Image: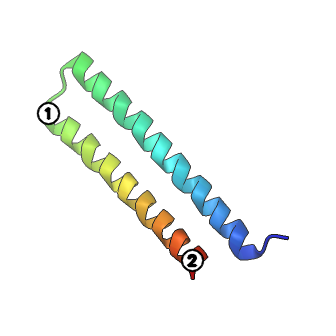
Amino acid sequence: MRGAGQDRDARQMRLAALVIAGAMCLWLLVQALGSYYGWAGEWAFLADLAAIGAFVWSLIVTWRIWRRRNA
């Protein structure tokens, strides 16, 4: 039987996976739209920073879950 901690970890891992997938899809979309419409390079850098922020957040969440499971 699963405990409350395992259920919480499973929810957080699903959220991290959704953030990774969503950030990548949005990043690709912004890059494609920027290329198509000829947006300035600053917008591409802004999209890059937002995607990096989402990936770093997901990495921190998964690292904390991994540490909790191995403790």
Asked whether 9 or 69 is in front, the reply is: 69
**Residue 17 x %, y %:** 54, 50
- Report which residue position mark 1 lands on: 41
- Distance in Å between CA atoms under marks 2 and 1: 43 Å
Q: Is residue 25 left or right of residue 4?
A: left
Labels 2, 1: front one? 2
For the point 15% across and 38% down, which residue is it? 42
Furthest-front residue in this view = 70
Q: Is residue 17 left or right of residue 45?
A: right
Q: Quadrant of the N terminus?
A: bottom right
- State the residue lying farthest toward the right: 1
State which tag comes first along the sequence, 2 or 1. Answer: 1
**Amino acid type of the residue that numbered disc 2 sits on in the rendered structure:** Asn
From this viewpoint, which residue is outermost toward the top?
A: 36
The circle on residue 70 is 2
Q: Quadrant of the C terminus?
A: bottom right
User: Secondary structure beneath disc 2?
Assistant: helix
Front residue of 68/33: it is: 68
Residue 16 in the image: state x and y as whole percent: 52, 55
Residue drawn 21% across and 37% down?
A: 43
Indicate the quadrant where residue 11 lies: bottom right
Could you classify mark 1 by the number of other residues whose Cα lies within 10 Å: few (under 14), some (14-19), or many (20 or more)? few
Q: Which mark is residue 11?
A: none
On screen, residue 9 above or below 19:
below
**Residue shown at 49%/41% (left/top)?**
21
Left or right: 40 in relation to 24: left
